[in-house]
Image (tube, rainbow, N blue to C red):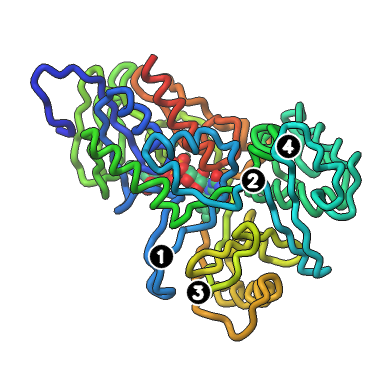
Amino acid sequence: MVFSETKGQSQRRAHIIGAGLAGLSAAVTLAGRGWRVALSEAGPVAGGRCRSYFDRALGCRIDNGNHLLLAGNRAAIGYLKAIGAGDTLCGPGRPLFPFYDLATDERWVLAPNPGRLPYWIFCPHRRVPGTRARDYLALTRFRHPSEEATVARILPDGPLYRRLLAPLAIAALNTGTEQGSARLFGRVLAETLGRGGAASVPLYPRIGLSESFVDPALAWLAERGAVVRFGQRIAALEIAADRVAALATADGERIALDPAEAVVLAAPAPVAADLLPGLLVPTSFEAILNVHFRISAHPGPAGFVALLGGLAEWAFVKREVVSVTVSAAARLIEQPAEELAAQIWPEICQALDLAGTMPPVRVVKEKRATVAATPAEDRKRPPAETRLANLVLAGDWTATGLPGTIEGAIRSGQTAAELLSR
Ligand SMILES: Cc1cc2nc3c(=O)[nH]c(=O)nc-3n(C[C@H](O)[C@H](O)[C@H](O)COP(=O)(O)OP(=O)(O)OC[C@H]3O[C@@H](n4cnc5c(N)ncnc54)[C@H](O)[C@@H]3O)c2cc1C
């Protein structure tokens, strides 16, 4: 029995499988509407691919990887406000993106104006060096790209592509520009830069991912009577007629659902496919590499810098560590961690004006960081609704219209909750 009964209560109930951001977002939305919620999480903690932990080698807490949000990520920001964590993000407070080219030693700051009218493209000191205002017309090609179009295919090569759009697309899609879907990247652009600089203000957690996205959600849910069972892996769904009648855990427990109880399946795509035979899901993934150096550095104007011309792509200067991200990193996954760190350390010294031998380092390889954001994989992403009357799907891999991101995951949880509330 998952829920404790309160006499006379007839609350609607939902059982959520997976306490990543999609599951937490579904739980928060449903609990906020008065539903009784129970979550089963296979792991020992919540947060899934977006979490913080104490790293023994470094002697401090780190995030599993740098996560950058933009002010236009409305669902994510709404979720944080709902759980009382609206003030846990920080950043430069204005649209500001410092860049450094390791190959040419050039630095510049992309600084869109806050309003919708993009006059920044007419100001040489605000735009990408070596570009002209008319080059930015290329951005309109992302408005209605064909379903098959890739980022590289619809953009002309040149400084705007190499110095801005390619690095942004790789970070947003976690997929190379030759394969990455122009439609998915176009959607990200439309919701951020396309709405003006104010929607492009960079944001990241002041302390850590768990302190922003996970711990406040768990506390908020606990206050509303939600139950979270850690180490409870759902191994099978028992289906009777057109409904999920019970959940079977990997420990052999059977969780019977009452006839009105709904299920949100918010586990990763391969798990969802196992639990629901016949469900079409994306099957190709991309990796992200994060290298955390235990060292202090000057945060610069934004707290991070985008890097070109080397292996490192983004360096975030945090309180106790400098954390470096390489996206679309499947090609690097088999390379030994020490080699990767040794290759990246001199780049970070050059970019952040550091020197000396390499400090303690942790290399985190997330092999299946996100679904590959290619047109072919995008076509496989299922909607939240399923053929079963009381089962809906959530997760960054469902058909959110966005690449695998915090915004997509949180929106998917909200969509799942909306469907159940109808
Ligand atoms: C290194 C890295 C960097 C990233 N950078 C960014 C970024 O800069 N910006 C951005 O917006 N996004 C970024 N992302 C993507 C973002 O983290 C994800 O899109 C988001 O966290 C996915 O959430 P989810 O709930 O859909 O999936 P998950 O986080 O995978 O959650 C699924 C949960 O289900 C649980 N589970 C699995 N099987 C079972 C089972 N059988 N029973 C019960 N529970 C189960 C898992 O343990 C997990 O907790 C990054 C991801 C990574 C890995």
Q: Nearer the viewer, mark 4 or mark 2?
A: 2
- Give above or below for 356 relative to 325: below
Q: Earlier in the sequence, mark 3 or mark 2?
A: 2
Label 3: which secondary element: loop
- Give above or below for 90 relative to 318: above
Q: Quadrant of the N terminus?
A: top left
Q: Earlier in the sequence, mark 2 or mark 1?
A: 1
- Relative image position of residue 302 (x, y in whole percent): 63, 57
Tag 4: residue type? Ala
Residue 159 shows which numbered tag?
A: none
Whether residue 407 sits left or right of residue 171 in the image: it is: left
Tag 1: residue type? Arg
Residue 61 shows which numbered tag?
A: 1
Q: Earlier in the sequence, mark 1 or mark 3?
A: 1
Whether residue 319 sits left or right of residue 70 in the image: it is: left
Residue occupied by mark 2: 172
Tag 2: residue type? Ala
Q: Earlier in the sequence, mark 4 or mark 3?
A: 4
